[in-house]
Image: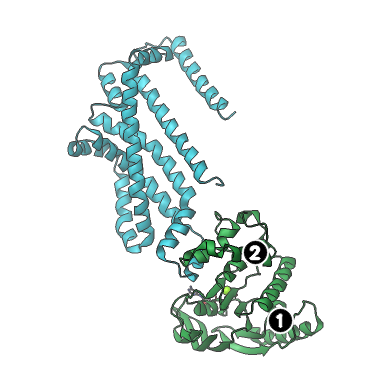
Chain colours: A green, B cyan
């Protein structure tokens, strides 16, 4: 579903990414970890079509990415909700922007909000919700696009530990129910091991793929499982090499 | 309480004024007492109300025109760096020119009628409207702009669904500044050359040394300004209930 071949990117003099080769399958969940500034967000923005690579090629569903696509959704670290819109109309924003009829998607929006436990909150304004609930709304806004590819840039890192765990388990559930290609950037090794089929470890300056690890554990997984902790420990070792 | 306190404030002011005219025995030719002013209004109520409407209409028309010109201008400035670089300094320069200095020229160009007054109002109003709208639109959080980009939203969506909507509270700040200036602009125009309006009344009553009439006209100007300002506040509450 996603193909990167020899992708490099520089911002002026800053060499952010170099020689990235990566394939992500149709239903595959790939997590990206690495130190701050090693180019994780840049990688996502290249796949999203928000940036054009300095070198190499980026393809989604077999087509070169030249601009943002409707079947690729992007979820940010912060919920990025419009404060003057209700939860429901925030979820329907992509539909409106795409020039489709929001009315035709209302049921779908209700359904998605129900799926993440926000049934009954449709008419609330974002400031009436907790940070975790806001990020769930943002997840629904991504899902209403029926994306074939979901790009998530540290979507849970602004949340407290408990909410974060809840949301990652919820995301696992969503991915089991509605599988799609996901690239998920995170700083948390445990989160990556819980969610991902494969984990990309980036090394910094410029960002390169240091390691591509298969998780290969059965689902559903749960945080704190012994098998998960083992994989986590190995990955921390790998990250240690990168940092050293 | 919302009404009581301002009324109390007004009564206190009028009381102090009245007291001062009595205690210091000021000549009513210099400072008329409140009673003189009311008497002078009651002599010509129809005429004064007519002049009030003239000034009110000039201010409102100019204010409306300023919104119709100012908001699109702000959109252009935010939308294009080239236009911003070209016209922002000009706008600042235009605003720096004292309006009193332009007024005679404006009257020469547009005559003694309403047109020159409306133009004066536009000249004083447009700046706060453009500045508040443009800076409000520019202060749109980066992540929201990025969201619209990631949806490949058309520019007009980014502008109207996001930036302008985000700017609304600040637009209203600019509108409130502008609406008080609007009345001043109209009066400046009337001072320089007019056949009607409260500014014209003040100007001519000064010439005939009818101080009470001038005070009555000023009181009416104050009433217009306050009414416009709070009227706008009411509209704001309707449009932005959560701000
Ligand atoms: N718009 C930009 N202009 C210039 N340099 C940039 C820009 N965006 C990113 N960079 C640089 O590119 C490098 C990679 O940035 P990127 O945001 O991709 O890192 P990251 O891995 O997402 O970091 P973090 O974990 O802190 O989010 C950094 O050195 C950063 O300074
Ligand atoms: Mg980042």
Image coordinates of residue A95 in percent, x first then y, are 51, 66
Q: Which residue is more in the foreground, B168 or A97?
A: A97
Instruction: Confirm if mark 2 falls within 8 A of ligand 2.
Output: no
Q: Secondary structure at mark 1?
A: helix
Q: Is residue A202 above or below residue B231?
A: below
* Residue A46 in the figure: left or right of residue A236: left
The residue under label 1 is A193
10 Å neighbourhood of mark 2: few (<14), some, or many (≥20)?
many
Q: Nearer the viewer, mark 1 or mark 2?
A: 2
Residue B34, by quadrant, is top left
Residue that numbered label 2 is attached to: A113
Q: Quadrant of residue B196?
A: top left
Q: Is residue B199 left or right of residue A75?
A: left
State the image coordinates of residue A243 (x, y, percent, origin top left).
65, 83
Apparent side of residue A220 relative to residue A152 in the rendered image (left or right): right
Q: Is residue B5 left or right of residue B98?
A: right
């Amino acid at each position: 579903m996603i193909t990167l071949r020899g992708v490099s990117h520089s911002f002026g003099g800053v060499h952010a990414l170099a020689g990235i080769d990566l394939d992500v399958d149709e239903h595959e969940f790939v997590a990206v970890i690495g130190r701050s500034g090693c180019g994780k967000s840049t990688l996502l923005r290249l796949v999203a079509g928000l940036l054009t690579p300095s070198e190499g090629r980026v393809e989604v569903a077999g087509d070169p990415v030249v601009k943002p696509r409707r079947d690729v959704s992007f979820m940010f670290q912060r919920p990025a909700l419009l404060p003057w819109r209700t939860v429901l109309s925030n979820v329907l924003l992509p539909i409106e922007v795409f020039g489709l009829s929001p009315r035709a998607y209302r049921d779908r929006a209700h359904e998605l909000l129900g799926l993440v436990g926000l049934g009954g909150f449709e008419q609330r304004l974002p400031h009436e919700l907790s940070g975790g609930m806001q990020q769930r709304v943002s997840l629904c806004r991504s899902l209403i696009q029926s994306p074939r590819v979901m790009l998530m840039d540290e979507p849970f890192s602004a949340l407290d530990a408990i909410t974060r765990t809840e949301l990652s388990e919820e995301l696992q559930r969503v991915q089991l129910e509605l599988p799609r290609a996901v690239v998920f950037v995170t700083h948390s090794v445990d989160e990556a091991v819980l969610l991902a089929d494969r984990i990309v470890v980036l090394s910094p300056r410029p960002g390169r793929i240091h390691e591509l690890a298969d998780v290969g554990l059965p689902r559903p997984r749960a945080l704190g499982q012994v098998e998960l902790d083992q994989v986590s420990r190995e990955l921390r070792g790998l990250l240690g090499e990168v940092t050293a | 309480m919302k009404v009581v306190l301002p009324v109390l404030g007004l009564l206190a002011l009028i009381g102090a004024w009245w007291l001062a005219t009595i205690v210091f025995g000021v000549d009513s030719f210099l400072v008329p007492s409140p009673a003189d002013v009311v008497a002078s209004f009651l002599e010509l109520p129809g005429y004064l109300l007519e002049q009030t409407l003239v000034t009110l209409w000039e201010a409102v028309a100019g204010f409306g025109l300023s919104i119709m010109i100012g908001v699109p201008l702000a959109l252009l400035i935010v939308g294009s760096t080239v236009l911003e670089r070209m016209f922002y300094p000009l706008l600042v320069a235009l605003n720096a020119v004292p309006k009193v200095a332009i007024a005679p020229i404006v009257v020469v160009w547009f005559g003694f009628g309403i047109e020159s007054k409306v133009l004066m109002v536009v000249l004083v109003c447009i700046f706060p409207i453009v500045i508040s709208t443009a800076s409000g639109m520019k202060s749109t959080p980066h992540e929201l702009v990025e969201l619209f980009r990631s949806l490949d939203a058309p520019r007009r969506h980014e502008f109207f669904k996001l930036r302008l909507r985000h700017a609304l509270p600040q637009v209203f700040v600019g509108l409130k500044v502008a609406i008080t200036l609007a009345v001043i602009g109209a009066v400046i125009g009337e001072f320089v050359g007019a056949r009607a309006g409260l500014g014209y009344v003040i100007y001519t009553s000064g010439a005939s040394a009818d101080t009470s009439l001038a005070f009555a006209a000023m009181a009416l100007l104050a009433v217009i300004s306050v009414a416009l300002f709070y009227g706008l506040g009411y509209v704001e509450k309707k449009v932005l209930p959560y701000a």
